[in-house]
Image: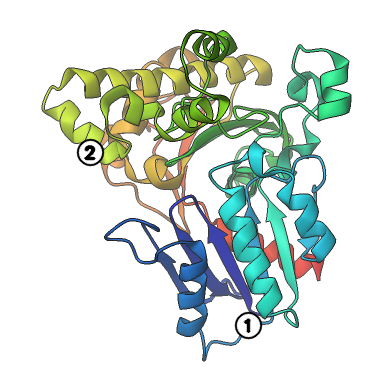
Amino acid sequence: MRILVINVGSTSLKYAILDPDSQIRNEHGIFDRLGQPDGDAANAIDAVEKLFRRLVNAPFDAIGYRVVHGGDCFQQPTLVSGPNLERLGKLDQLAPLHNPPARRVIEYVWQNRASTPQYMVFDTSFFAALPPVAYRYAIPDSWLEQHHIRRYGAHGTSHEYLMERASSYFADRDLDPMQLRLITLHLGGGASAAAIRGNRPIDTSMGLTPMEGLVMGTRCGDIDPGIILYMLRNTPRTADDIDRILNKESGLLGLCGESDIRRVLERVHSQEPSAMLAIDIYVRRIQKTIGSYFALLGGLDVLVFSAGVGENSPEIRSRVVESLGCFGCKIDSEINQSPLFDNGIADITSPFNDPNAPRILVIKTDEELAIARKVALAR
């Protein structure tokens, strides 16, 4: 079976045609910097039109879409239909950078290729299993019951894939995969963490929306909600202004004027104060999250780095682990600089570490493969 996976981001559209069993990719690529002067397409619809022209001679049996937020409506891979698209449209505000462009692409393709089976796979579905102690906010019950305000998480497709790969990695080693205590870090333009025990999530850093939690490229992560009220009451800014600023003009961009962590690190090496502070804040938030998850898990067996930054930035990995020695986390600095990947996994744990201390892995995430597998099971 060949599945076309379409992954629409805020400024990109990634795609792949792959067999979920053999993992063979027949086609794959990306349309990047959508809407920008030097971009590959004017917008997501333009990108998907170019995609199908590119794939005119590439057959596939079904389509799977990555959708960031499914709210409490969608907790499983879901067949694309008119009613389901209408329900999906009501969730736009919960993931304003990702859900609207993804929905527009799904609607466009569904209308033009209705004969092809099409499924939506939701990043939030993995965290539907969170216990109430993790997903409830300390707010009135009516807010949950009437407005469905709770922690939904995001990047769940990636975190679940990382969990499965880590469990498989240790299946023939010295750790029982069903007893593993994991912290998975998906560090890219968006960033999130998850605490996982016994192959089930027990906490995650993103909340009602993907804005909560870690510092990201343009998103603020955790802030005092009183800041929003203060700005609304004391400035002429509207709710839409605040939404735009916190989602698109904050994070690393707000701290130092640059959202690409590679360029921020270049400026750090030039001793630029704003970049140095931005990286310190970025790393500190990750360390605080790891520390809290260590307590919730009652210890730690495996720490996983993944996604664009987690997989490709030895400096960020080193900075994050630097203060975790009290938990027994130590990396081999030489291996960390050039990880030796075996089937997408590299162990960068110091060989001089206590054998009972946490292992530190870099795992190449593969959301497209994870989505293709879920679509194949759903058919």
Question: Disc 2 designates what residue?
Answer: 263
The residue sitting at 23% across, 33% down in the picture is 265
Mark 2 vs 1, N-terminal side:
1
Task: Indicate whether 81 appears above or below 113.
Answer: above
Q: Toward which corner of the image does residue 321 lie, by quadrant? A: top left
The reply to whether the C-beta atoms of the residues labelled 2 and 1 are less than 8 Å apart is: no
Q: Toward which corner of the image does residue 215 lie, by quadrant? A: top left
Disc 2 marks a residue whose amino acid type is: Arg
Q: Position of residue 126 (x, y in %)?
A: 72, 43
Q: Which mark is residue 101?
A: none
Q: Position of residue 32 (x, y in %)?
A: 38, 60
Task: Indicate whether 4 appears above or below 165.
Answer: below
Residue closest to the eye, 364 or 309? 309
Q: Position of residue 131 (x, y in %)?
A: 81, 26
Q: Which mark is residue 60?
A: 1
Q: Position of residue 200 (x, y in %)?
A: 74, 36
Residue closest to the eye, 366 or 121? 121
Which element type, helix, strand or loop, lies under badge 2? helix
Q: From the image, which quarter does the N terminus lie in?
A: bottom right
**Side (left or right) of 193 relative to 178:** left
**Residue at the extreme left:** 270
Disc 1 marks a residue whose amino acid type is: Phe
Which element type, helix, strand or loop, lies under badge 1? loop
Task: Indicate whether 36 appears above or below 207.
Answer: below
Q: Toward which corner of the image does residue 133 lie, by quadrant? A: top right
The residue sitting at 62% across, 49% down in the picture is 99
Residue 367 visible in this rendered orientation of the protein: yes
